[in-house]
Image: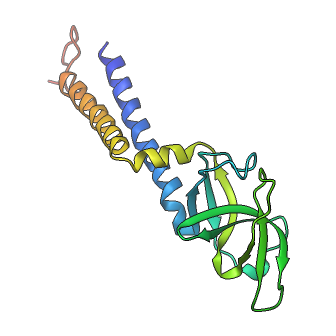
Amino acid sequence: MEKIFKIISKTLSTALVAAVVLLAIALVGIRVIGFTPYTVLSGSMEPTYHVGSVVYVKKVDPTTLKVGDPITFHLTGNVIATHRIIEVHGEGTPNLGFRTQGDANETVDGITPASAVIGKATFSIPYLGYLSNFLQQPKGLITVVGTGAAVLAISYIIDALFPAKKESEPEAGEENTNG
């Protein structure tokens, strides 16, 4: 029974650490190599980018963008959108702009100036946006920290109840043959 508790304890601790590391890489560490994550909040790009996904955007020179590229841009004020380029306007001029449209939208967007482009959407991870948004809420942070603390506390309790045996200690029923 002791071994089962120890195995469960070590497995939970390892899984917790692995989950935290992977989440940190997916949401923060990825920025080190030039990607910025954005959570998809609307279905305008379904089925390419599902609501609740995290889209990873790489900064690019706007002059390299072409029809068919999904771009992330400042739509209005603080609103950021990811839509697909359907037309390039003013190519080779200071007035470079892009007409975009969401894959699921019937209407076409206005022309987005190159200066509003954040970058090119490169890949996405489904459902990660739900977790990211949950973690940014007080309830989510408390839940995650509480769960982590509980797993670590259980691990320490199991270690205290069943301390590791030293190699020099004989098992019950065995004799110590060391002198």
Residue appearing at x 70%, y 80% in the figure: 114
The C terminus lies in which quarter of the figure? Answer: top left
96 left or right, relative to 167:
right
Can the viewer see residue 165 in this picture?
Answer: no
Q: Along the line of sight, which residue is nearer the eye, 82 or 28?
A: 82
When asked about the image quadrant of residue 83, the answer is: bottom right
User: Quadrant of residue 88 in the image?
Assistant: bottom right
Q: Residue at x 80, y 91 (%)?
A: 93
**On screen, 129 above or below 109?**
above
Residue farthest along the top direction in this orientation: 173
Residue positioned 37% across, 42% down in the render? 140
Q: Is residue 134 above or below residue 35?
A: above
Name the foreground residue: 82 vs 162: 82
The image quadrant where one finds the N terminus is top left
Q: Is there any visible trace of residue 136 in the rendered image?
A: yes
Q: Which residue occupies the foreground of this view, 175 or 107?
A: 107
Residue 8 percent across, percent down from the top left: 38, 24
